[in-house]
Image (cartoon, grey):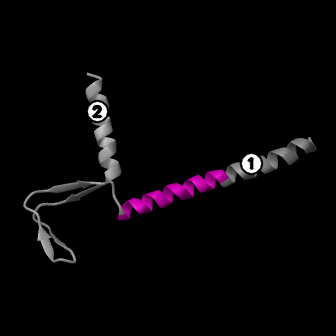
Amino acid sequence: MKLHRYLLTPALLICSLFASCSHADKRALNSSAMYAPPVLTLKAGTEYKTKEGVITFREEQRFYSAFELARLLLINNLQDSGK
């Protein structure tokens, strides 16, 4: 019985450490998405201030990160090849 207790306690401790690390990574990932979102949509008629001045778009503009664009193109190619 003592052997189980000595083996189980470190195993549970290691598992809890890995679980807490994985949760911390997810929170860090979510907060980084705030500064580098996968998709950025700029609304038509809204003024956006930049270093160069103020810009207003006539139509809604959508910008994709390189990773998101590659992901969407890959999904589209996979769907097209399945037809």
Asked if residue 10 lies left or right of residue 65, the reply is: right
Q: What residue is rendered at 28% in x and 25% in y? A: 81
Q: Magenta stretch? A: 18-35
Q: What residue is rendered at 49% in x and 61% in y? A: 28
Q: Which residue is denoted by mark 2 in the rendering? A: 77
Residue 52 position, x and y percent, is 18, 77
Q: Secondary structure at mark 1?
A: helix
Q: CA distance from mark 1 to mark 2?
A: 44 Å
Asked if residue 37 lies left or right of residue 56, the reply is: right
The disc placed on residue 64 is none
Q: What residue is rendered at 33% in x and 54% in y? A: 38
Q: Which residue is denoted by mark 1 in the rendering? A: 12
Q: Earlier in the sequence, mark 1 or mark 2?
A: 1
Q: Secondary structure at mark 2?
A: helix
Amino acid type, callout 2: Asn
Q: Is 21 a magenta residue?
A: yes
Amino acid type, callout 1: Leu
Whether tag 1 and tag 2 are in contact, CB under 8 A, the answer is no
Which marked residue is nearer to the observer: mark 1 or mark 2? 2
